[in-house]
Amino acid sequence: MSNDIGPVGRHEPPVMWQPHEGTRHAYRPDYYAEGAEVAALCGEPLEVRRGLGEVEWLWTSCPECVAGAWRLVHGTEHPSGGEQA
Ligand SMILES: [Zn+2]
């Protein structure tokens, strides 16, 4: 298996998505607190925020975070290999 990041608690969503500088990144919710600094699955540092606007959720997802989130959820490589269509 390629899920090398570790198991995810059953009571938490496997990943959270965070808009950051025009792109949506994913991170593990271990540090889910307003204002917390976290590293996205691609390594990008970002700040956890809540109360996000609708527009931000329409931003493009970071391909590396898409692939990383897929691995956390499914335990397999993303079918596209992380590339966006
Ligand atoms: Zn990312």
Image (spheres, rainbow, N blue to C red):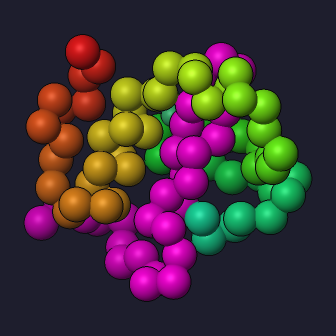
The stretch of residues the image draws in magenta is: 1-28
State which quadrant residue 24 falls in. Answer: top right
The residue lying furthest to the right in this view is: 35
For image coordinates 47% across by 27% down, the residue present is 61
Asked if residue 41 can be seen in this view, the reply is yes
Indicate whether residue 16 is drawn in magenta: yes
Q: Is residue 36 above or below residue 59?
A: below
58 relative position to 20: left or right: left
Nearest the eye: 26 or 52: 52
Q: Is residue 38 above or below residue 65?
A: below
Magenta span: chief secondary structure: loop
Number of marks: 0
Q: Position of residue 32 (x, y in %)?
A: 71, 65
Quarter occupied by the N terminus: bottom left
Q: Position of residue 55 (x, y in %)?
A: 70, 22
For image coordinates 20% across by 62% down, the residue present is 75
Q: Position of residue 70 (x, y in %)?
A: 29, 50
